[in-house]
Structures are given as C-alpha cells and as structure tokens.
Amino acid sequence: MPGEWPVVELGQVVDIQTGKLDSNHADIGGAYPFFTCAPEPLRINRYAFDCDAVLLAGNNANGVFHLNRHHGRFNAYQRTYVITPKGSSVIDTTFLFYLLHTLTRRLGEYSQGTATKFLTMGILSHLPVELPPIVEQRAIGHILDSLDDKIELNRRMNETLEAMARALFKSWFVDFDPVRAKAEGRPTGIPPHLVDLFPDAFEDSELGEIPKGWRMGPLDSVLVLQRGFDLPSPKRTSGAYPVLAASGPSGTHNEFMVRGPGVTTGRSGVLGKVFYVHGDFWPLNTSLWVKEFRHSRAAYAFHLLRGLDFGLFNAGSAVPTLNRNHVHNLPTLLPPMGLIDVFERVAVANLARQRHGADQSVTLAALRDALLPKLISGELRVPDAERIAGRAV
C-alpha cells in the first residue's frame, strides 16, 4: 500500500553527472547517440559515457524535461543529466527510468528560470522518492518494460510493412522490374499467375520509357482532388470520426463528410504529407481529399500521391498553397486496372496490419500509463499488475 516503502532522496541512491559539450558538437551520421535537451538524440563521433543510464534534459522553455534511456556508449550535452544507480542492489535502472517518468510533472514545478525553465543538481539530488525492495523494483520495471517492448516491436513492424509497400509500388509502377526481367529473359521474382499482367517490352512516352501497352493521361484521369470542408476548432473535440488537416489528424467530430476508405493531402500550410484514412472522415479546408478514384483505388492512390513532389506545385508565398489544377494536369501513368487491383489487395492488407499495430500500441501505452503511477506508489502490487499486463501483451 502507499506509504509502506521508505522515502529517500534521489541523490542517496543514484550518481548524477552532466555532459560536457555544446549541442554544436554533433556530427551528422555520427557513430554514437548524443543526448541533448531535445526529445530525440543527435549523433556524434566520440563518446564520454559507456554505461546503462537514464538521460534527463536539464532545461526546456516550457518546463517539459525529456527522458531517455540508453545502454552503451554515448555522449551528452552540458545541460543533460546522466543518472546511474550507485549500485545494482540499491536501485534498478529500469525502475529508475519509470520512477523518473512519474516525477516529470513535479520536476516542472520545482524547476527554476523564467524564459527557460531549468533543473539544478540540487533539485534532483534532494528529490524525495519512495524506494521499494530491489526485487520488487525489478518486477515493476519488467512489467512496464514489457509493455514498452511490445509498443516498440509494433513500431518496427509497421516501419517494415511501410517499407515493403513502398518497395512493391516502386518495383511495379516506377522501376518496372518485372517488365525489365521479362524483356531480358530473367525470372521476374513474382508469382506465376501475375507474370502475364506485365508486358515484355517498353515504348517511349512523355515520361520516358514505359511498359508497352500501358497508357498515359493527366492525373485527373486517375483521381480527382477536392478541397475539404470548414470545421471550427471547438467542434473537433469529440466524436467517432477523425478530422484530417493538412498536417494530419486534428481531433474528431460526431459527423463525417466523406465515406472511407479515403486519401487526403495538404492544400494550405503543410504540403507533401499524404494520409490513408481507413473509415469515414471529415477533411478540413486546409486539405484536399480524393473525391473520385477514376483509374485507381484508394491504397494505390495513396502510394501514387506520396511519390509526388508537392513543393514543385506551391502556389503560395508566406503560406504554402497547393493549386489542385496544377496537380490534375500532371502527366501520369495508367497501368492496367487488373494490376492495380492486385496491388490494392496487397496494400490494403498491409495498411490494415499497420493500423492494427498502431491501435494496439495506443491501448498498450494507455495501460502502461495507468499502471505506472500505481506500481511506483505501491497502490497496485506486482502480481495483480502482471495479470493485467499479461492479458494485454
């Protein structure tokens, strides 16, 4: 129960150091992580630390102090705190990482400064923390870490699925790999029932060499883009349907304007981001949505639009703006619909798996965030948390 564990000052159980470098010491593509006060580390070609440590940003304009964990060689900015256990039998590093997560709001309250909030060594050293027995620390850390491991596994799997879909689209509709293989008498590497969907020769077009028999046309012969709809910010607070802005999801609403699945991209403010929407949705007036799939399907259109350089069509100055008529006139390849349909089945299944992984990660993150303060405070004991987490993972 809360209050059963001894309260100690953080400095009694951990060693706290800072890095020595300015952020301009970073090296693009460096060999080691370089932890600054930003959420994600930079890279650097020399290391000063080789240990299992928790990295805490020491300053932030908004009083939000980012936390990272790293095991191995790294370097750190002079306002980044490198926190390590005084001994493995005193405090577990994984437990320490999650313990500090529960204290980040309090750190914002303790921080000093006006324009930029900062933490001092004294603030951290004298921070009171409850410390359960080491065995329980390790058990708590294991439960929370297993949830984060599953979230990370989902993230990597989604990246892999994303890369596979991009590679397939590029191979079939940009590089024409099966066509080249057939023209050169090589194996195509695709299932036999798909081989006949690709010709064995090329012909010239305004886009250069394209598969023989495939047609060309303006983009609006493939799909038609339409401006989104107005919806004031106060109305984007709750509902069953996602609201899509130029930069992506922007809340939810209790009504939809477009039946899904659909595709959107930016019209004003942010150009170049393309989104596949699985269900019904509301596209905002800063976005364009595909009103009509003429010689395409939703997933195919999603990958096609992602291959465009929307910056070339910017018609704005201070605010980037996309004129859909300029995009509609773009010369575009029209592969056979039979081949597009084959790609669509693969791509839709791929996108569904990505959505499942993303949804599962949201659920796991919510569970982790619910368990975290209760485990750290002792309100929830390890056996009960193991049962709850086990059902989720």
Image: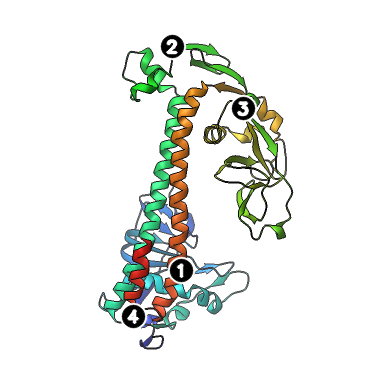
Residue 134 lies, in percent from the top left, at 28, 78
Local packing at callout 2 (Cα closer than 10 Å; few below 14, some 14-19, many 20+) is some
Residue 72 lies, in percent from the top left, at 30, 59
Disc 3 to disc 1, C-alpha distance? 45 Å
Q: Which residue is mark 1?
A: 369
Residue name at image x 46 percent, y 52 percent: 358
Disc 2 to disc 1, C-alpha distance? 57 Å
Q: How many marks?
A: 4
Picture disc at residue 230 = none
Q: CB of mark 2 within 8 Å of CB of mark 3?
A: no
Q: Amino acid at mark 2?
A: Ala
Left or right: 19 with respect to 237? left
Q: Which residue is mark 4?
A: 13
Residue name at image x 38 percent, y 62 percent: 392
Where 230 falls versus 85 (above or below)? above
Disc 2 to disc 3, C-alpha distance? 26 Å
Q: Nearer the viewer, residue 23 or 329?
A: 329
Q: Which residue is mark 2?
A: 201
Local packing at callout 4 (Cα closer than 10 Å; few below 14, some 14-19, many 20+) is many
Q: CB of mark 4 within 8 Å of CB of mark 1?
A: no
Callout 1 secondary element: helix
Residue 286 lies, in percent from the top left, at 69, 45
Which tag, 2 or 3, sits closer to the chain's start?
2
Disc 4 to disc 1, C-alpha distance? 25 Å
Q: Which residue is mark 3?
A: 294
Q: Amino acid at mark 3?
A: Arg
Residue 268 lies, in percent from the top left, at 69, 43
Residue name at image x 42 percent, y 72 percent: 372
Residue name at image x 50 percent, y 11 percent: 203
Q: Nearer the viewer, residue 319 or 203?
A: 203
Which tag, 4 or 1, sits closer to the chain's start?
4
